[in-house]
Each structure stands twice: as structure tokens, then as C-alpha cells.
Image (cartoon, grey):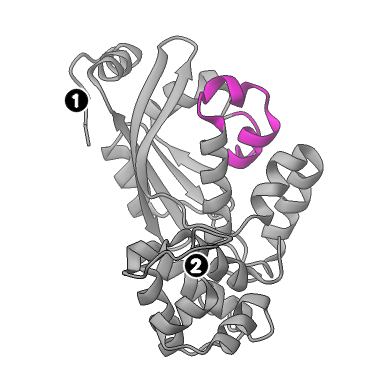
């Protein structure tokens, strides 16, 4: 993981924006389809020299006003703005928004337990910032247990995806799932977090390049919602819509069928016809 996460993030976002998207002419002889530093400097009102120092990690203390100007110029989403803010705080050493050396949450609060009880017919799982599975519904167990995801103590989503051979069979879109798991890990942890560092060291040794190249890539915000394909040994291929809710160092991920075939397959696993209806879009 780079010690210049803020600079890598700014550069990756700059290179992802085309001149046409911000009303600038593309012009000839461009080495990249993204914005040049000078173009971003003009759009944001930040000097080219200062922008260069930020991207190269020679300045790690941008003001909130500069961050806001860059975020506006780059047209960052809300999630990307949150990540920019957190990376800037980590870079400056002000880690108030990052967990630092606080142990990852392992206690399931009574209110969260009650919520999971009420969601029991729906596949839902509670995770901490390291991807440890803290609790889940019985419907999620029917979904995840047969593929091997709940093995281990405690079971961990990243360990399963990167170190268990069954994961590549379970996730037809394994590369995208792996990207998302690493993005969630990075978004929830600080590089100075020893618990994060321990898991990174473990996966670096056990998984090698498939894990480390994702960790070394420019950071991107994790997707909070989407559709994930899962191949279940009993139910076949399922398309699952998911929604992620953050709550004080924990994430609740709820899955719903994305089509009628998946709805029927989940009902069959639960022996409860009509329990879950497909959610599209």
C-alpha cells in the first residue's frame, strides 16, 4: 500500500475525467485522455505547483477549501468526496475519522441483533471493518454456508475471496468482487491501523499478487449497492441485489433477488414460497 494514498487518489481521479466532460477542448497530442495538471489547476483555482506537490506527496496538508475546489473540479461523487476527506486526514496525521489502533468491532449490539432477527427471511450479514462476519440471518447462512464462506473462526470475506479456491467458482465475476472487497477494506481502515496491517501482511503472503496489486492501486470508494452473481451448489447461479448500511465501524449488507429466477431459487432454499420478491434497478 502506497504511503501517498492521497496523491494517488487525486491523480487517478484527474486522469479519469476527460476534457470534454468539463467543457474543455481535447486538443492534439494528448498522452492521456484525462485532464492535464494545468487544466485541473485552471478549473479548481489551485496552482499547478501546489497540485504537483499534492500528487507527489510533498504536501500533505491541503485545506478544506482546496479539497472542496478539487472535488468540484473533478466532479467527485459523495462517496469519492468522503474518501478524499479521509485520505487527506490520514496523510496529514490527523486520523480522527480513521479507526487507528482501536480494535475492530466484534460485539453485536442488541439493536443490530434485533434488526437481523426481523430480517431473518432475507440474506443479511453484519461485518466489521476488516470484513469479519459478526452475525447473519439464517437465510444468509443457507446462501453462504454451502459455498464455504462461513468456514473459519471468525469467517472473513477477504480471506475467503483471496485464499479459498472455492471463491472463484462461487463468484463468476471474481475480479470485480475482489476489487470491491479490497475497496471496502481500505475505506474502513487507516494505513496506521495495526489490525489492518496484520490482515494485509497475512493476505500478502497467502494470496500474493491478486491481493497486493489491488492494494497498491489508486484507492476507489466501495460500491454501496449493486448486483452480485453467486453460483450456489444447490440453487445454481443467483443474481443478488445488495444494499450496504454503515453503522459505527460495522456494515450491514442486505441481499435481495435481482430477478424472478433468483427469487424462486431463494424461496426454494428457505422452503418458503413467496417470501422474497425480485428487486430490479
* Left/right of residue 265 with respect to residue 44 in the rendered view: left
- Classify mark 2: helix, strand or loop: helix
* Left/right of residue 184 with respect to residue 45 in the rendered view: right
* Left/right of residue 113 with respect to residue 198 in the rendered view: left
* Left/right of residue 238 with respect to residue 93 in the rendered view: left
| Front residue of this view, candidates 25 and 206 | 25
Read off the magenta span.
Answer: 151-174
The residue sitting at 41% across, 55% down in the picture is 109
> Where residue 281 sits: x, y (%)?
22, 37
Give yes or no for residue 198 being in the magenta stretch. no
* Above or below: residue 47 compared with residue 211: below
Q: Residue furthest front?
A: 28
- Reading the image, the residue beneath label 1 is 277
The residue sitting at 56% across, 29% down in the picture is 149
Q: Residue furthest right?
A: 205
> Where residue 278 sits: x, y (%)?
21, 26
| Few, some or many residues within 10 Å of mark 2 (<14, 14–19, 20+) | many
- Reading the image, the residue beneath label 2 is 14
Q: CA distance from mark 2 to mark 1?
A: 41 Å
> Where residue 121 sits: x, y (%)?
28, 28
Q: Is residue 278 visible?
A: yes
* Above or below: residue 186 compared with residue 254: below
Sequence order check: which comes first, mark 2 or mark 1? Answer: 2
Amino acid at each position: 500500500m502506497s504511503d501517498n494514498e492521497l496523491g494517488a487518489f487525486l491523480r487517478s481521479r484527474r486522469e479519469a475525467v476527460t476534457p470534454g466532460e468539463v467543457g474543455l477542448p481535447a486538443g492534439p497530442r494528448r498522452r492521456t485522455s484525462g485532464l492535464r495538471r494545468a487544466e485541473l489547476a485552471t478549473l479548481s483555482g489551485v496552482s499547478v505547483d501546489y497540485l504537483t506537490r499534492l500528487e507527489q506527496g510533498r504536501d500533505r496538508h491541503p485545506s478544506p477549501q482546496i479539497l472542496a475546489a478539487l472535488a468540484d473540479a473533478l466532479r467527485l461523487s459523495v462517496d469519492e468526496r468522503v474518501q478524499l476527506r479521509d485520505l487527506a486526514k490520514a496523510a496529514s496525521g490527523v486520523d480522527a475519522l480513521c479507526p487507528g489502533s482501536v480494535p475492530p468491532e466484534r460485539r453485536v449490539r442488541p439493536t443490530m441483533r434485533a434488526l437481523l432477527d426481523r430480517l431473518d427471511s432475507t440474506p443479511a450479514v453484519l461485518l466489521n471493518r476488516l470484513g469479519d462476519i459478526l452475525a447473519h440471518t439464517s437465510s444468509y447462512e443457507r446462501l453462504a454456508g454451502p459455498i464455504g464462506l462461513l468456514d473459519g473462526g471468525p469467517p472473513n470475506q477477504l480471506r475467503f475471496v483471496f485464499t479459498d479456491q472455492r471463491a472463484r467458482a462461487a463468484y463468476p465475476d471474481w475480479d470485480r468482487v475482489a476489487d470491491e472487497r479490497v475497496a471496502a477494506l481500505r475505506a474502513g481502515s487507516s494505513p496506521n491501523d495495526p489490525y489492518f496491517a496484520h490482515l494485509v501482511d497475512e493476505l500478502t503472503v497467502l494470496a500474493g499478487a491478486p491481493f497486493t496489486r489491488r492494494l497498491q492501486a489508486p484507492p476507489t470508494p466501495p460500491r454501496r449497492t449493486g448486483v452480485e452473481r453467486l453460483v450456489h451448489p444447490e440453487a445454481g447461479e443467483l443474481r443478488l441485489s445488495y444494499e450496504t448500511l454503515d453503522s459505527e465501524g460495522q456494515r450491514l449488507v442486505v441481499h435481495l433477488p435481482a430477478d424472478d429466477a433468483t427469487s424462486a431459487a431463494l424461496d426454494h432454499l428457505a422452503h418458503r414460497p413467496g417470501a422474497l420478491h425480485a428487486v430490479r434497478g
